[in-house]
Amino acid sequence: MKYFLIIFYSLCFSLAAAQEYTSRDLKVSPYIDGTLLVPQNEVKPPLAIIIAGSGPTDRNGNQMMMKNNAYKRLAETLSNRGIATFRYDKRIVKLMQARTNFSEKDFRFDDFIEDATAVVDFFAKSDDFSEIYIIGHSQGSLVGMAAISARSDIAGFISVAGPGQSIDKVIIDQLGKQAPALRENAIEAFNDIRVTGKSVNYSPGLASIFRTEIQPFIASWMQYDPQTLISGLEIPVLIINGTNDIQVDADEAKMLQNAQKDASLLLIENMNHIFREITEVGMDNQKSYNEPGRPIMSQLPNAIIAFISKK
């Protein structure tokens, strides 16, 4: 009986400690739905807004055929330790769920910046938080930088796995490593888009990048240079990348720091793109993208908390 009680009380304590925040779903605009977590017993905590990476990514870090809950786990960890968080579905998720006559050719990178700006505006009007921080993951790093570049009401910016080059250069570098035979053709296609707004002479092997419907989006995305944007930030900046990130190489983080000398750089050993620890070369990295039960590496939230608490 005593053994049972020990287990029972231990379980109750674990459950009580597992959630030390309140959760509320919010509609920020017709395009933006998200979840706000606010630490319990905290008066005016800092708020971290999490901006998602590329693709139709929802507030939890998931896509239709990929569930890892990366953002959900990060947000819950931060909010359990005194930092309020807001994470939101990307606009494209809402449009796809609504089954509207959504057309890729009408979408622009600026739409993401517009949505991030709307989120920041929404919370900037609130008196519930002491400061606002931006956490931009992958593509969301560039979105976040663009959204706050002219603002004075942001306390700090955190780039997690953010590219250090414009998207055309990132893709060209990736092709050079993974499909070198397509590299020169990609350079030509990007140059065509830059000059004329479209490309027609691209290899079928590059169709997923250059198909006609998404060329306007690619053209708008190419206009933003992360090094230029980060160099203009006059707030504290933390740059984080994992050494086992197969989507954004750690060298990209170094490029960002070279552009913003005052930024802090943290390379987390063995962390992959979705914040998981990968110690073996092979399929384990890709498998982790569909393993929501796998914990995120503690170094990531620890670094973010230390950065915010330093203020």
Image (tube, grey):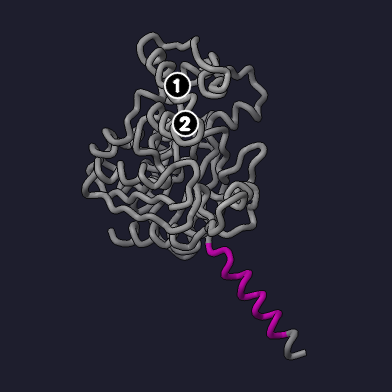
Q: Residue furthest front?
A: 181
Q: Report the front residue among 254 and 232.
A: 254
Q: Position of residue 178 (x, y in %)?
A: 50, 35
Q: Main secondary structure of the magenta part?
A: helix
Q: Position of residue 269 (x, y in %)?
A: 43, 58
Dot 2 or dot 1, earlier in sequence: 2
Q: Secondary structure at mark 1?
A: helix
Q: Marks 2 and 1, how far apart in space? A: 8 Å
Q: Residue at 56%, 22% (x, y): give it.
A: 205
Residue 222 lies in the magenta stretch: no
| Quadrant of the rendering where the C terminus is positioned | bottom left
Is the Cβ of the residue at disc 2 closer than 8 Å to that at disc 1? yes
Specify the quadrant of the image occupied by residue 147. top left
Binning the other alpha carbons within 10 Å of mark 2 as few (below 14), some (14 to 19) or many (20 upward) gives some
Q: Secondary structure at mark 2?
A: helix
Q: Which mark is residue 252?
A: none
Q: Which mark is residue 175?
A: 2
Q: Is residue 213 above or below residue 123?
A: above
Q: Amino acid at mark 2?
A: Leu
Residue 13 lies in the magenta stretch: yes
Q: Position of residue 275 (x, y in %)?
A: 50, 53
| Quadrant of the rendering where the N terminus is positioned | bottom right
Specify the quadrant of the image occupied by residue 122. top left
Q: Report the front residue among 139 and 20.
A: 139
Q: Residue at 63%, 27% (x, y): give it.
A: 96
The span picked out in magenta is: 5-20
Query: Is residue 132 among what the camera can see?
Result: no
Q: Residue at 46%, 16% (x, y): give it.
A: 216
Q: Report which residue position mark 1 lands on.
A: 186
Q: Position of residue 12 (x, y in %)?
A: 65, 75
Query: Is residue 303 among what the camera can see?
Result: yes
Q: Residue furthest bottom?
A: 2
